[in-house]
Every structure is written in C-alpha cells, then in structure tokens.
Image (spheres, grey):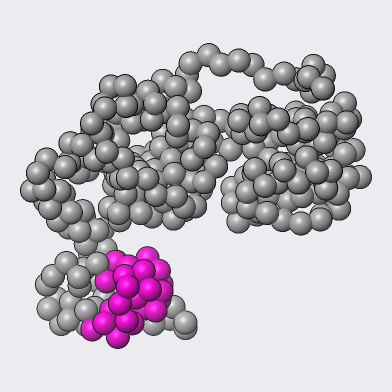
Amino acid sequence: MDTLQLQSFVMVVEMGSLSDAARKLGVTPAAVGARIKALEQELGVPLVKRTGRFVKPTLAGTNILERSRSALRDLRDLRTAANSGASTSELRLGVFPTAMTSLLPPVLKRLYTKQPDLKILVTSGTSIELCRKVDDGTLDAAIVVEPQFLLPKSCDWRVLVEEPLVLAVPRELASGDAHEILRTQPFIRYDRTLLGGQLAERYLQEHSIDPHERLELDSVLAIAALVDQRLGVALLPDWAPLWGMGMDIARIDLPHRPPTRRVGLIWAVHGSRVPLAQAFFAEAKAVFSEPSERRPSKSNRPH
C-alpha cells in the first residue's frame, strides 16, 4: 500500500468518476484504475463499484474512506514537520473571489504586524471547491460562504461576517419600493449555483415576484457595474466595499426579513498548522468586530 493508491481511491470517491479523478491528479484514468486495483488486491476486498456513469464506494470502501483521508493528512503533516520548520511559518489559505479584495487585505495587514515572517500561500476558488480542499488536506484553511452541507468531523467552521440580501439599483431609483422595482425593472440575476444567487431566488419565490430577467452572472462586482450602466437591478449580498467604489448605484433594504449570506473560516482541526489557522481566525474576527463607519441609508446617500 502506498500514498498514491490511497490518494487515487479518495479522489475517485470524491469525484465520482475515474476520468475526473485522473484529471485532478494529472495522470491517466488507466493509472488511477491500476492504483485502486492494487489497493483492492492488497486489502482483499473491492472498494469501488460502477453505478451507471458514476463510481461509488462499496461498503468496504465507505468503511475505510475517512481513515484513508486521515492517513493522507498524517503523511502530509510528517513531511511538513521534517521540512525545516515550515509548519510554523506557512499557511495554505483558500479564499473565494469576492473576499480576495474585501475580507483578506485588512486581515493580512493585522496579522503581519504580529507575525511578519509568516508565509501565506493563497488559492482562489468557489466555496465548495475550497471546503473540499481543506477536507482533503490540500489547504489548511479557507474563507468561504457558509457551507450548505454537513461538514466532516475533521473540519471546523466559524462565522466572520453576515451579509443580508439587498437590492442594488441605479441611484435615481433609490427612493422606490423594492418589490415594485423588482417587478418592473430588468433583472440581473446572481448565479443560482452560488449561495447568494440561491438566496435571491428563494426571496423572489417567497414573495411571488417574477422579474424580467435579462442575464445571469457569477460576479458581484460585475453585476454592480451593469447596474451602474442602467442595464437592470439586482439582488446581491450586502458586500460592504461595493458602496464605496464610486459607482452611481444605491442600496435598498429588503422588507420582510431578507435572507443572509454568512461568510467565515473553515479549517482542518488536526495537523501542524492548526495554530496558524486559529490565529488567522482570531485576527479576522477582531477586524470585523471593530466598529466601522455606518453606510448611508437609501435616503441620505450622497448624489
């Protein structure tokens, strides 16, 4: 049994496909299949089975899945500990795209005043991708939107900031009724594969609003730029930096307790870099607990 066999087994189960796992690992599907077959021969039981187009673990595969992940994490930690003290000076951090320019900079500024020699390797990706990478040990921690699935016991997640859904409109519509605007103005939809877009869809359905949809995008900043160009209105998480970028847009609070997107930090609870992840969370929490200048309401925004 070797690391590559365990890694291939775990990746196939997570991806549900030999070919997808092979792409992630940078090898051929035949190589992945051979590794898993060798592991099965050594253990004496089948670990995966085909179900239609997908590959799923057998009962034996399910029984060893978490232990396989744990073994891979332990091996990575051993290599890290042997690598000239890198475990105390390097953090592999994931950040979803919007947080790269809003959440990350002030936290790093505060953290580096206390740990100037700290090295942080930053990876961008969707929240779902980043959670998976923390779970499999590729990342030590990640700033993500609150996971909508049950986290494995190997991970912890804590809230940093809450962003209620708001209506972004061209400034001349700032005094209008939110629901009337949604029913009459062209609508720019936030991608429904993302949590913010799912919250927006839920709100529209709960209030029986069928907007005149114009297009769908996965970037808060890009959507705001389109609103600035008078191409429509949008339901977006109340991302604080958006309102100070000089765009000619306004924010209207939604009535009836709008849904809220929560952003926080997920990290692996075992391994040599846990103290660094916890220190990062503490500094991030301190940043977002500090009083900040209150945003002007829709009635007193500067023109």
75 with respect to 159 (left or right): left
Q: Residue at x 39, y 49 (%)?
A: 123
Q: Is residue 95 at all visible to an observer of this figure?
A: yes
Q: Which residue is nearer to you in this view: 51 or 168? A: 168
Q: Is residue 32 magenta?
A: yes
Q: Is residue 119 magenta?
A: no
256 with respect to 272 (left or right): right
Q: Which residue is nearer to you in this view: 50 or 276? A: 276
Q: Where 278 sits versus 145, above or below?
A: above
Q: Residue at x 34, y 75 (%)?
A: 22
Q: Quadrant for residue 245, please give it.
A: top right
Q: Which residues are magenta?
A: 8-34
Q: Quadrant for residue 110, please give it.
A: top left
Q: Residue at x 11, y 48 (%)?
A: 83
Q: Is residue 167 at all visible to an observer of this figure?
A: no
Q: Residue at x 20, y 72 (%)?
A: 5
Q: Where 17 sits versus 190, above or below?
A: below
